[in-house]
Image (cartoon, rainbow, N blue to C red):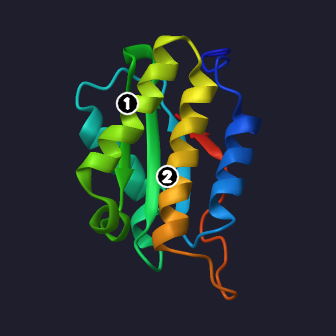
Amino acid sequence: MPGMFSRFDAERIVAAIAKAERDSSGEIRVHLTSHKPEGIEERAVRRFQLLGMDRTRERNGVLIYVAPRSRRFRIIGDVGIHEKCGADFWREVAAGMEEHFRRGEFTEGVVHGVERVGEVLARHFPRAAEDRNELPDQVTED
């Protein structure tokens, strides 16, 4: 579907991911789907696994999964980060993203989510000298 994701600026999102990961050992990915998934939670978890997000050294991967056609999204955090921040944090990030989305600010919504997640990752999983980027900083699509 050409132009399906034209409201998302992938370069800005990738730059936000790189910046958010600079101070942490955490991994953040963003995935946009052209599908209208009925079971969005299951689809997001499956994509999390397919992208290798559950195989990071500290189990601190976070996926922002966006389904624009169904106007839905999910944020999936691996067990390491979820243990540190809890469900209230994910709800707060989602609320901030949703506020942007409602105004038609799609890239800003995703960037907001990436930045907030990056702050928490930096606090709980600070970058050490031997850290390396375990997963590519890119927006994936299907």
Question: Residue at position x 39%, y 17% from top?
Answer: 71
Q: Give x and y (percent) for residue 9.
A: 71, 28
Mark 2: which secondary structure? helix
- Few, some or many residues within 10 Å of mark 1 (<14, 14–19, 20+): some
Quadrant hosting residue 83: bottom left
On residue 95, which mark appears? 1
Quadrant hosting residue 85: bottom left
Q: Give x and y (percent) for residue 99.
A: 45, 21
Q: Are marks 1 and 2 in contact (CB under 8 Å)?
A: no
The residue to which callout 2 is attached is 117
Closer to the chain start, of discs 1 and 2, is 1
Comparing 71 with 111, the one in front is 111
Comparing 98 with 33, the one in front is 98
- Identified by mark 1, the residue type is Ala
Q: Is residue 106 above or below residue 129?
A: above
Taking 106 as reference, is 85 left or right? Answer: left
Q: Is residue 91 above or below residue 136?
A: above
Q: Give x and y (percent) for residue 30.
A: 54, 43
Q: Give x and y (percent) for residue 70.
A: 37, 16
Taking 132 as reference, is 87 left or right? Answer: left
